[in-house]
Image: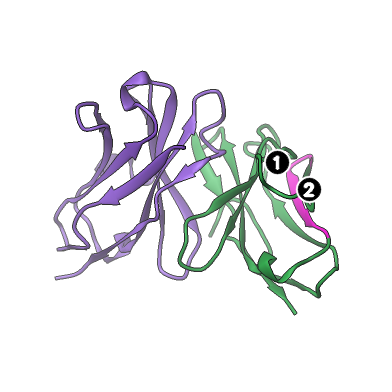
Chain colours: A purple, B green
Amino acid sequence: QVQLQESGPGLVKPSQTLSLACTVSGASISSGGYYWSWIRQHPGEGLEWIGYIYKSGSTFYNPSLKSRLTISVDTSKNQFSLKLSSVTAADTAVYFCAGTPYSGSPVAIDYWGQGTLVTVSS
Amino acid sequence: QSVLTQPPSASGTPGQRVTISCSGSSSNIGSNTVNWYKQLPGTAPKLLIYSNNQRPSGVPDRFSGSKSGSSASLAISGLQSEDEADYYCAAWDDSLNGVVFGGGTKLTVL
């Protein structure tokens, strides 16, 4: 069973970089057999796709976030990470990491982390 | 403003059948498969339907999905109190080159 756990600061100052990591257990990041995704949910609102990484390096990003976004993997820690630069209050949200086998679709996400609230405030 | 359009709310009584619609366009639902998620308050979404009408292991057959043209629907039969949740549709969008979600439908079991 694949399990994911987000970690990172819960409070980020405006204009700084939001950095989150997702630790994966039950699957190997280095195997390249999964799409590893980030999705966020603004308070009281719907889901917003952030992006995903697969094949240990290829990425697809939400066009509206692309200029500020980096998703990468750290195979030594079996983690993938999210970095979002120049954050504003509009980036305050619950951030979910997620994964789905490469045999499926990156839109049909099987495994989710519990989510972590990141607040952007000074 | 979500790319995929869902009604904000739906309701039904126990045992009833309810449907939730998801409307898109030729660049998303019209040319790609639709997936549905269920989300309980304070928890992560759970995949309910993939590839328009397929249920992951463990999802009851009370849940079914369909697609026609650029629209899709989720049907829940034999409504139960534990079905009260938010439901989201999702699809790939060829124009945006990314995943798009519906705005979500809050289902209330009366």
Q: Are marks 2 and 1 in contact (CB under 8 Å)?
A: yes
Q: Residue at x 40, y 42 (%)?
A: A3
Q: Is residue B88 above or below residue A24?
A: below
- Considering the numbered disc 2 on the image, is that residue within a helix, a strand or a loop? loop
User: Is residue B72 highlighted in magenta?
Assistant: yes
- Secondary element type, mark 1: loop
Quadrant containing the C terminus of chain B is bottom right
Q: Position of residue B2 (x, y in %)?
A: 55, 56
**Few, some or many residues within 10 Å of mark 1 (<14, 14–19, 20+):** some
Residue A71 seen anywhere in this rendered image of the structure: no
Chain identifier of the residue bearing label 1 in the image: B
- Residue pointed to by mark 1: B55
Q: Residue at x 69, y 74 (%)?
A: B108
Q: Mark 2 — residue?
A: B61
Is residue B78 depicted above or below A27 in this figure?
below
Percent x, y for residue B4?
62, 51
Viewer-closest of B12 and B30: B12
Instruction: Pick whichever of labels 2 and 1 is earlier in the sequence.
Output: 1
* Segment tinted magenta in the rendering: B67-77
Q: Is residue B52 magenta?
A: no
Q: Is residue B12 left or right of residue A82?
A: right
Depth check: B8 or A115 in front? Answer: A115
Instruction: Give the farthest residue toward the right.
Output: B16
A76 displayed left or right of B25:
left
Amino acid type at mark 2: Asp
Chain where mark 2 sits: B
Q: Quadrant of residue B6?
A: bottom right
Image-based side of A39 in relation to A7, left or right? right
Please indicate whether residue B15 sits to the left or right of residue A42 in the image: right
Amino acid tagged 1: Arg
